Image (cartoon, helix red, strand yellow):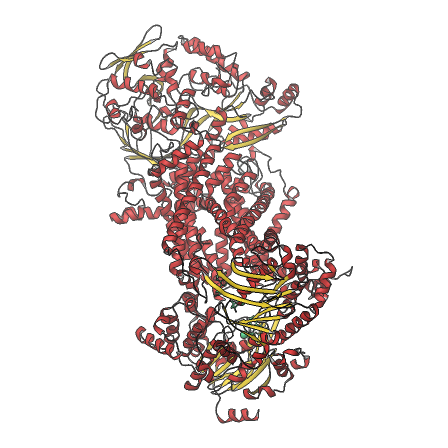
Amino acid sequence: MSLIQQITEMYTPLLNVENLNVEFRNHAGKSIHAVRDVSFSLGQERLGIVGESGSGKSTVGRSILSLIPTSAKIKANKIALNGVDLLKLSELEMRQFRGNKISMIMQDPKHALNPVMRVGDQIAEAFRLHNRIGRAKAKQKVLDILNDVQIRDPERVFRAYPHELSGGMGQRVMIAMMLIPGPDLLIADEPTSALDVTVQMQILAIIDDLVRDKGMGLIFISHDLNLMASFCDRILIMYAGRIVEECRASELSQAKHPYTKGLLACLPTVENSDQKLTTLNRDPAWLE
Amino acid sequence: MSFWNLKKKTLSSGTVVKNRLAVPLFLYQALQFISSILLTFLGLTAVTFFIGRVMPIDPVVAIVGDRASSVTYERVKLELGLDKPLYEQYWKFLTDILQGDLGISVTTSQPVLQDILRFFPATWELATIATIIGVAFGVPMGVIAATHQGRWPDHLIRFIGLIGYSIPIFWLGMVGLLIFYAKLDWVSGPGRVDFFYDGIVENRTGFILIDATLAREWEVLRNAFSHIILPASLLGYYSLAYIARMTRSFMLEQLSKEYIITARVKGMSERRVVWKHALGNTLIPLVTVIVLSYAYLLEGSVLTETIFAWPGIGLYITNSLFNADMNAVLGGTIVVGCVFVSFNLLSDLIYILVDPRARS
Amino acid sequence: KTPSNTMVMAMNADDIISFDPAQVFELVGGEMIANIYDRVTMHEAEDLTALVGGVAESWEVSNNGHTINLKIRPNQKFHSGNPVTAADVVFSLTRVVKLEQTPVFLLNQFGWKPDNVDRLVTATGKMTLKLEIPENLAPTLVLNVLSAGVGSVVDMKTAMSHEKDGDLGHEWLNTHTAGSGPYELVSWKPNEGIIMKANPNDRHGAPKMERIVIRHVPEAATQRLLIEKGDVDIARDLTPDQAAGMAGNNDVRIQVDPKGLLKYLQVNMKDPDLSKPKVREALRYLVDYDGMANSFLKGGYIVHQAFWPSGFFAALNDKPFSLNIAKAKKLLAEAGYPNGLDVELDVFNSSPHPEMAQSVQATMAKAGIRIKILQAEKKAVYTKHRARQFQMILTHWGPDYLDPHSNADAFASNPDNSDEAKLTGVIAWRGAWEASATTGVTADAKTELDLGKREGMYLALQRSVQMDSPFIFMFQNVSQTAVRANISNFVSGPTFDTVFFRNVTK
Amino acid sequence: MKTEKTLSGWRDWLLAETPESALQARLSRIYLSWLSFKRNPLAVIGLLIVVFLVLIAIFAPWLSNHLPTDQNLADRLQPPSSKYWLGTDELGRDIFSRVIHGSKITLYIVFLVAIIVVPLGLFVGTTAGYFGGITDKILMRITDVFMAFPRLILALAFVAVMGPSIENAVIAITITSWPPYARIARAETITIRHSEFILAVQQQGASAWRILLKHIVPMCTSSVIVRLTLDMAGVILIAAGLGFLGLGAQPPSPEWGLMISQGRQYLLDQWWVSTIPGIAIFIVSLGFNLLGDGLRDVLDPTNN
Amino acid sequence: MAGIIDIHNLDVHLGRGKDAVHAVRNVSFSVKKGESFGLVGESGSGKSTVLRAISGLYKNFTGKINIDGKVQNQHKGVDFYKNLQMVFQDPYASLHPRHTVDQTLSEPLQIHKLDQVEKRIRTALERVGLGLNFRFRYPHQLSGGQRQRVAIARAMILEPRILLLDEPTSALDVSVQAEVLNLLTELRIEYNLTYILVSHDLAVVAYMCEQIAVMNQGQIVENLSKDQIMKSNATERYTQQLLAASKGYDRDAAGKLLQF
Ligand SMILES: Nc1ncnc2c1ncn2[C@@H]1O[C@H](COP(=O)(O)OP(=O)(O)OP(=O)(O)O)[C@@H](O)[C@H]1O
Ligand SMILES: Nc1ncnc2c1ncn2[C@@H]1O[C@H](COP(=O)(O)OP(=O)(O)OP(=O)(O)O)[C@@H](O)[C@H]1O
Ligand SMILES: [Mg+2]
Ligand SMILES: [Mg+2]
């Protein structure tokens, strides 16, 4: 903790979230407190958010972009990017931030790309929304970025429709689209969970390199503990809308919170195959 | 919705086995189309023939009238070939039609083909304007309703649509005439064109609006337009109601998709998200809806045609049916049926054009 | 709003199937050819009661009535410019007989058949011809028949120039005309309308209206809108209530003309219950004649209870029946139906028939006769009627020509009541009524040469049918034509043969 | 189960997380649907209209102050008054009473259409969709023929053949309106026939017909029923249209469509004769439409 | 080979015409009674297709499928299914959304006309660790883990001897996955069941199975024992890469990945 505090005091952090709360209303009219009192800050680093399904990971990510349904209530002391409080922006101003300053990579490229638009146009659109630039120039820019995400045949992919791409290719396109305006902060919401392990590795490598080269901040959302530990710098562990623990990635195996420990113990491996897996005993106290 | 299910599942990976019969896809589709037309055609004519046989109207009486003596009766019966067994009559009909001969209508004393070439364009013209109205208003209304789901514009638009769904058209037609024609004098009355404009323009397409434009007879065009606008608006209102409702529900579906969020993440304005991305995808299923509702209008609406004294195909077929004029009924049915089938094909073709997924 | 040289008329014109006088027997079609073709003899617009020469200038009837010599009016021209000659008349009459279309029965009763007609109808000179009538017929009857559509004179040269497969020009004449009357067909678009143009050489002088436009408007309410708006000059099919509704409109006038059309109920004598005389008598007391005539039929129909319409030669105007439920009940009880009976009533589905049927249904119900109404298209009802497959039917009949025999032949005579006889043109036969008491009298009456005696015979026939027959005559039609105020001299006679456009002025 | 329950007790019972019996489970499901249905005001209005229609139909004899067929030619075409609340028609019958009694016929039409169209459409559609192949081809071609046939002609011909009556008119309507239902059912079947819960029953050795009847048909019914309620307005209107042509209900039946069509010639002078039944049709079809829209939101499987 | 399941030269073609796919090529393996056999491979490699061919869902296969010594032909009788059951990947899709747990469980009993319905349902529910109060719930009232338990109960209620498991836990959170895997292990021991388990998660397969086959593009690339995996002792490059990739992110390794 102390180390992180030091860092935040030294620089203005890239992103600062204080006391974020999000409430949804479900079909039966009950309210769901999806995110409770979440605070964290982020520099130019790879921050991981883990937790089981429904713990509020995605909601945190979307709240930063203000892309929560209007029916939901969002409250926070502050969501500041480079010192600008996003909560105070009008919708029009917020649009200048989306894509341009903050981007988000979605989980499933199959559904997250517009099926009837050419891939190249979709990427170019992301750029042209924020920059006045001619078609030809935009195209060149797109081809460049496609190259950056290691697509071997950018011309062909430029003309392709999303359904003509494999999952891995689709995810690269998604990344290209999100990176092309050159955002300061990239949120990746389970960008690889729909992909095979080997493809996953390649995609992560691309994101990794880009973050390093361009000096972006990255929020990486996933439920895969192993992956997090090996990929991120720092990890937030969420349970039922709260951050229950925060630690350096390398120190995950020494996590202290019983929930984190429980999750780690649940994982089947070839080594523990003669034993029964330990299961999670949820303690109501975790919700405090 | 599509007749030939051109939507094929796209495969993510796996090896594609070479198609042994390397028939080009379009040829395959053309064959499918032709066989489908043929089968539908056979089905239609067979059913119609059956109807002709069981109709409680004696076709001979329908021609010779109430007072004919039995001599006349028998002679006409013989002339019509009604003494022959039904399959023979059917066979003759089929062979005749293959030579382009639909026979003579006994109620108009004219070749059925010629009748249809006159009545069908009248209906077609009406249906086209109605569909244009339906699409021009229905689609935007549906989009607005969807983007304002649960709020007053949504309720208002749905209510307007529901009214369109719920009022008998003959009643609305009469009231429409009463108000817009008799009282307000905004439109011309029943009929396609005032008679003194009749015959001024050469009949090239059967569509008065087009013929008048081709002939640069603006007076005729204006007059024809003022005749068609009221019945077309009424029919258009009905298709508007349907199109708006379907647009709304397709839009709602699309708006809940993830690529919409992607578009927003890019920082796109809400208007662009809705009208470009969401509507672009909505158009795909919507095309089928629009084309189908257009096809239904092309059947002709007897009620509208009666009220507006519109010489359309619906009235023609109905009149012929009630006069047991089976040549005319068969001809009309075939035309309407084939148009229907072709329109379905058309909707599939458009589908392929607008949906890249259907193309590969 | 209509041009001053044109008369525009809205009517339901969907019954036209042909313009060939040898075939036309429909109301609207008949009316059209009456204005296109001059007939051999005619009732003229100026005096509807007098039978005068049309194409024929004069005639002589032999004493026995079997031979009629006709002289053709000189200097008449067909629309084509061809002169009208005796040969054209011979051609026209023999053509009708040979083509054997519906109206042929009118000429058949003269004894003319395809194999003998060439012999019986002959030109005796360029402008004279001779008709031989093998049957015994009153000459007035013969001359009256020649004023019907079958008496139309067709331009032989024009017709034969379009002959196909020996059809005597029938196919061409279905959609074209070749007459010598005041108007000439310009175009006929089924379901849309008809346009006619004036014949400047008409023997009455050129008609005032250069064009006649008939617009097919099936819906009566639409017709009313059109005439009120001035988009048509005449509307023909208004209901009585609609006509009454226009009373306050000074631009439109309702022209009232008596017509020969009768509305009647008929029971099928094959029905064991309805054929009982007491039951049939009871039925006659179960129709609210005056109630209907004074309400929804008001102005459109008058009560008439005999088979020959009033206003004509030998009409019987007695009205012995009125609604009398007590009496009907008593009669029914006597007949053995104290609890009434169930009856199906076939009726056209067009106004005012459903209303009439419902009224009849309501009054009959009061005596326990439970009517089930079966509405259908006209042609379907005709089919049932001709096939003798009905229990009770509400339908109509108008004379084919202005001689009482026209109706007596249909209602009072049934030479052979067997199914095989197929006398489908005879109404009595359709209802399986023997008509034993009247068939003979009918045959005698048509040959009676003495007018006074003839009248007596027809009156007696009518009385007999009125009291005991399967028919319940209820109403006679009075046409209500809505006419724009600036239109005058639209003459609408009792039959479709006597509707004249040629005098109309604006 | 307790024998006595307060209102809130019932509510809790219905909302129980753990139902104790199949009945409770089913009721609870219905209740939950009702709760979400209830939140759509338009849908509730629709339901109220339909319920109102049913009530009127049941209590028609007590609600009306005249007999629907009683003629009084002296009082014909009277405007609305205290004696005749909604005026009289061309035969002097009380329009109010006729409209009230006509509700029975409308309900009857609705009922008849429902019990014919739904099973027919479901049968053809699910069979075609589930078996696929040649069965599908044949059934769909038949459907196409009926779809491509001019609908009114088919209906007219049927009524003309069978004789005009309300039953035949309704059957005629159903003959022309089942194909879309078959298509809906087929489309739905195709999307679920390879779903895992169907594979699971196949895995248990269930016969094709069992799968169709017990597993597939229930999945299609809701969309079919929704479509039915949405179509109801159309059905009532087509029935009215047949009445207009004299082929629907026969006089003196107070069927609304027939009333409009017979009254249309009085529209210019006595507007109420055809307008009042027109309004009745409008309200009822509005009711069905609103109900259908609401039901779609509740029953739509994608919503759960 | 005298396993309870013997597969010999299995080939499966799927789709028709232009979309024809040779989904499984020349696959052979054998599973002993009481053994747990694992199939791993990447998406689309044909794992599910193998299972479905065995279970009779795909009829047009070539090659031999031998179960319990009996050669399986294309058409299966009802008895076949009593012996062999399958659990599907997606617990959200494998339960009929409109049937209660009770209906779902009684369906197989009705099909096979078994008696003591009440008793069997109760035992089955207890056995998978669901209380009786779950009996009348609808799927939407259950969590993912609970649903998968219901699916397992449905398969077990016929007391089969072979259970085919197609990614039974890949839709579940790790904590829930642990519970389900524990349950499967228990059941196998208790009833001496034979498993074929399909998964793309090497860890799960390695944890559960004695024998593992690695599939790629419809073919079995390599057969491995648990030991070999433990020692990362694979001979094929493909398998090695798969093993490495499932250990977690490694920038260097990522750069050297090969395409297969
Ligand atoms: N639009 C919404 N309406 C209502 N409830 C919602 C909505 N979106 C999310 N929730 C609820 O908020 C909670 C948090 O959801 P969120 O999607 O953030 O979880 P997550 O951690 O991303 O889970 P997963 O790993 O499954 O993606 C869940 O209980 C979810 O049901
Ligand atoms: N019904 C089908 N028609 C045509 N091709 C199919 C069909 N089902 C599967 N395939 C194809 O067969 C191949 C093998 O599919 P299969 O489902 O067995 O893969 P899998 O290994 O189970 O993959 P996953 O891990 O994604 O479930 C794939 O290429 C797939 O696209
Ligand atoms: Mg998420
Ligand atoms: Mg699989």
Left/right placement of residue D200 relative to residue B56 reads right
Judging depth in this view, the residue of A116 and C461 nearest the camera is: A116
Residue B25 place in picture, x, y as percent = 38, 56
Direction from residue C280 to residue B308 in the image, left or right: left
Q: Is residue C98 visible?
A: yes
Residue E145 position by quadrant:
bottom right
Residue in the foreground of this view, choosing between C55 and E9 = E9
Along the viewing direction, whichever of C5 and E209 lies nearer the viewer: E209
Q: Residue at x 41, y 85 (%)?
A: A214
Rendered image quadrant of residue A180 = bottom left
Q: Quadrant of ligand 1?
A: bottom right
Where's the N terminus of chain D, which quadrant?
bottom right
Residue A176 position (above or below residue B32)? below
Q: Is residue B141 left or right of residue E55?
A: left
Between D276 and C354, the residue placed more toward the observer is C354
Q: Is residue C224 visible?
A: no
Q: Quadrant of the C terminus of chain D?
A: bottom right
Residue most toward the right?
Answer: D3
E95 up-or-down from A125: above or below: above
Q: Position of residue C408 (x, y in %)?
A: 46, 16
* x, y percent for residue D28: 67, 61
Total of numbered circles in the picture?
0
List x then y, in percent, for residue C478: 44, 27
